[in-house]
């Protein structure tokens, strides 16, 4: 009975002739999930990110010790039963600091991933849809931002605003939007003269309605793929700012700052810097694997190939 019901539901979702809009949307989501699930590496990336989110949500309960508690008598201890990943120069448990540091990593990645694509989407679609001098001005501003290396520009912003995690997030967001603007503009140029855009304009739709209702939805899938692939770069940039002392300030357990604290002891007490470095590597790899899987699902050109 249950197997027959599941088969019927599967056939309903995979129907070539959906009867309602809801069936069509659910069918598209299910087909996308099947495509994503078939990519084993993408599933591995998703599992790692789920573990990261779980760590961040339940950090106070998962961390074996207080991440800020110092024990100078137990400083620089190697990995053991008492401290699975060892202790740092102040005797703090590295595993506990990594678990709590996952909250900072998710905060930085989530905030930048929310702000930068929105700015890029708005600027790119307005430039591509308007054309003329508006397009020229917005794209020249975009070119100015693209002319500077992202990390160098972020360093300049943080140096001007002051060293803090909030200013680091703002600096990363202000330097991350130009690629999204370029991508959104390219998508807009391909669809702004489409027949359905002309039909909507004849029905009285204004420029903002055309952008929000008809152009933005078609640009979102490409931006999602780009965001997922850029997550690793955002994590590395945030870690770089923390390593230089321009991001999260002590005693916050930010992974880049932890590497900076351990670089002095890396030859004799390798675990102090290696463990947060390994965490950054694993999370960056997970985002790259997830981005590849999302590209297979959301990129129509890749689907046709």
Image: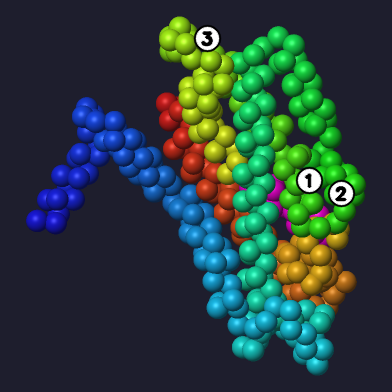
Mark 1 → mark 2, Cα distance in angstroms: 9 Å
**Which residue shows up at 48% across the image and 49% down it?**
42
Residue 195 visible in the shown view: no
Which residue corresponds to mark 2?
161
Question: Which stretch is magenta?
Answer: 231-243
**Which residue shows up at 31% across the image and 39% down it?**
26
Residue 265 visible in the shown view: yes
Q: Nearer the viewer, residue 157 or 2?
A: 157
Q: Where residue 123 sits in the image (x, y, percent)?
A: 67, 26
Q: Nearer the viewer, mark 1 or mark 2?
A: 2
Residue furthest bottom as drawn:
73
Q: Are marks 1 and 2 in contact (CB under 8 Å)?
A: yes
Q: Are marks 3 and 1 in contact (CB under 8 Å)?
A: no
Mark 3 → mark 1, Cα distance in angstroms: 36 Å
Q: Assess whether residue 8 is covered by the magenta stretch.
A: no
Of the image marks 3 and 2, the number of the one nearer the N terminus: 2
**Which residue shows up at 81% across the image and 69% down it?**
250
Quadrant position of the N terminus in the picture? bottom left
Q: Are marks 3 and 2 in contact (CB under 8 Å)?
A: no
By secondary structure, the bulk of the magenta-drawn segment is best described as: helix
Which residue corresponds to mark 3?
193
Which residue corresponds to mark 1?
171
């Amino acid at each position: 009975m249950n197997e027959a019901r599941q088969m019927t539901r599967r056939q309903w979702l995979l129907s070539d002739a959906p009867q309602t809009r809801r069936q069509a949307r659910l069918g598209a989501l299910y087909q996308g999930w099947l495509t994503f699930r078939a990519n084993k590496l993408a599933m591995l990336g998703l599992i790692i990110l789920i573990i990261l989110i779980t760590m961040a949500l339940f950090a106070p309960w998962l961390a074996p010790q207080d991440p800020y508690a110092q024990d100078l008598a137990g400083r620089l201890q190697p990995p053991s039963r008492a401290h699975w990943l060892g202790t740092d120069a102040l005797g703090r448990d590295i595993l506990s600091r990594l678990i709590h540091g996952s909250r900072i990593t998710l905060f930085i990645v989530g905030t930048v991933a929310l702000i930068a694509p929105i700015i890029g989407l708005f600027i790119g679609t307005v430039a591509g849809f308007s054309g003329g001098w508006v397009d020229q001005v917005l794209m020249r501003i975009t070119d100015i931002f693209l002319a500077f290396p992202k990390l160098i520009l972020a360093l300049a912003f943080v140096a001007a605003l002051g060293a803090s995690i909030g200013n680091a997030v703002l600096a990363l967001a202000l330097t991350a939007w130009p690629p999204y603007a370029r991508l959104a503009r390219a998508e807009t140029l391909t669809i702004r003269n489409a027949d359905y855009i002309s039909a909507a304009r004849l029905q009285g739709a204004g420029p903002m309605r055309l952008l929000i209702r008809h152009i933005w939805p078609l640009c979102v899938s490409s931006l999602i793929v780009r965001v997922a692939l850029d997550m690793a770069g955002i994590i590395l940039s945030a870690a770089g700012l923390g390593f230089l002392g321009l991001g999260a300030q002590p005693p916050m357990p930010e992974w880049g700052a932890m590497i900076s604290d351990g670089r002095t002891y890396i030859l004799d007490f390798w675990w102090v810097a290696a463990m947060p470095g390994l965490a950054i590597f694993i999370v960056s790899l997970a985002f790259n694997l997830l981005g590849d899987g999302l590209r297979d699902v959301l990129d129509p050109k890749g689907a046709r190939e």
